[in-house]
């Protein structure tokens, strides 16, 4: 009973209903953390006005972006966070701590 919605532009594929673990795991395996980070960053950037009205959704998307950015290596996610507009200093500090934790975990996975 799952339905898949495609958009004409680049964006997210949204499944409704039970689509099973095979579909979810194949998506995760098919796209690496760098590509997935770009998807989340795109959502954060293009939907900033809407996210400004929902701090819970905004924090969730930033966490997903920072996790994937940290797992892909480099400092890009941290630099985006530092220059982000609309986030409070407190929120930036909390998200920076979250990013740093994933950077440490990612470095342990590479050994």
Image: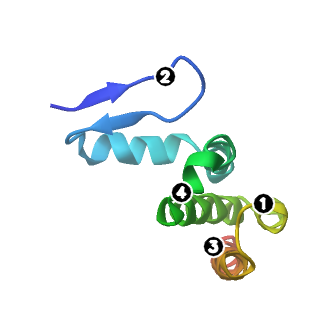
Q: Is residue 2 above or below residue 101?
A: above
Tag nearer the camera, 2 or 1: 1
Cα separation, mark 3 vs mark 1, equals 32 Å
Circle 4 sits in a helix, a strand or a loop, which is it? loop
Which residue corresponds to mark 3? Answer: 109
Which residue corresponds to mark 1? Answer: 85
Disc on the earlier residue, 2 or 1: 2
Q: Is residue 81 above or below residue 108?
A: above
Q: Residue at x 61, y 43 (%)?
A: 47
Query: Foreground residue, 81 or 69?
Result: 81
Do we see residue 12 in this rendering?
yes
Tag nearer the camera, 3 or 1: 1
Do we see residue 111 in this rendering?
no
Cα separation, mark 3 vs mark 2, equals 35 Å
Which residue corresponds to mark 4? Answer: 53
Circle 2 sits in a helix, a strand or a loop, which is it? loop
Disc on the earlier residue, 3 or 4: 4
């Amino acid at each position: 009973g799952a339905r898949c919605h495609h958009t004409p532009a680049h964006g997210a594929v949204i499944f409704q209903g039970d689509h099973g673990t095979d579909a979810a795991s194949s998506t995760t395996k098919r796209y690496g953390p760098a590509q997935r980070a770009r998807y989340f960053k795109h959502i954060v950037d293009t939907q900033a006005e809407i996210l400004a009205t929902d701090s819970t959704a905004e924090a969730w998307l930033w966490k997903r972006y920072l996790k994937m950015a940290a797992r892909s290596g480099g400092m890009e996610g941290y630099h985006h966070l530092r220059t982000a507009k609309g986030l409070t200093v407190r929120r930036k500090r909390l998200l920076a701590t979250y990013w740093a934790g994933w950077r440490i975990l990612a470095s342990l996975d590479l050994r």
